[in-house]
Amino acid sequence: MTTNSFDSVFTSETLRQLFPKERSNDFFDALFGDAAEGSYDIELGFREVKGNQLVMELLLHERPGHCLACNLTQGLPQVFSRHPIINLSDLVKEIDILLGDGTTCADWSLGYTEQRSRSLHVIPLKITLAKA
């Protein structure tokens, strides 16, 4: 697949379907017992394809009245990688289906939390691609 092909697969609508907005509230409800306690909303994004690596992003957007910078986002890759509500294993399986018969998702890992701004932190989801 070419980069343009990936752009056409990972439209904003498809990304919302893969990772619905409600998942943030479900995550914080499970974590704190109240979704309103969460300091950010999680959104799925498409970053790039480099060689055989597809890079998606978990975008952490600060919620109004909360402080994302004060939150402990550096430890989130370990939490997100195994949390059943975030469910990255199934997310990668869904991405694999979207890619079609020519390409498969062989493996995945989360990178380190990146601070893009005071109100936006990003966790890269790195997916190794292989020919089917």
Image (tube, grey):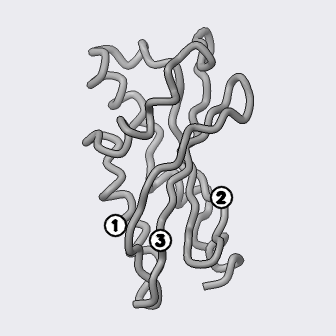
The residue that appears at 40% across and 90% down in the rendered structure is 132
For marks 3 and 1, give the one nearer the viewer: 3
Q: Are marks 3 and 1 in contact (CB under 8 Å)?
A: no
**Earlier-in-chain disc, 2 versus 3:** 2
Report x, y in % for residue 69: 63, 18
Q: Amino acid at mark 3?
A: Thr
Give the residue at mark 2: 47
Local SS, label 2: strand
Report x, y in % for residue 8: 64, 73
Report x, y in % for residue 10: 58, 65
Instruction: Tell me how far mark 2 sits from mark 1, CA to CA.
Output: 18 Å
The residue that appears at 44% across and 49% down in the rendered structure is 19
Instruction: Tell me how far mark 3 sits from mark 1, CA to CA.
Output: 12 Å
Give the residue at mark 3: 128
Q: Amino acid at mark 1?
A: Lys
Compared with residue 20, is residue 32 higher up or lower down, i.e. above or below? above
Quadrant position of the N terminus in the picture: bottom right
Residue 59 falls in image quadrant:
top right
**Earlier-in-chain disc, 2 versus 1:** 2
Tag count in the figure?
Answer: 3
The residue that appears at 48% across and 65% down in the rendered structure is 127
For marks 2 and 3, give the one nearer the viewer: 3
Q: Residues within 10 Å of mark 1 (few under 14, many from 20)?
A: some
Residue 47 falls in image quadrant:
bottom right
**Earlier-in-chain disc, 3 versus 1:** 1
Give the residue at mark 1: 93
Q: Are marks 2 and 3 in contact (CB under 8 Å)?
A: no
Local SS, label 1: helix
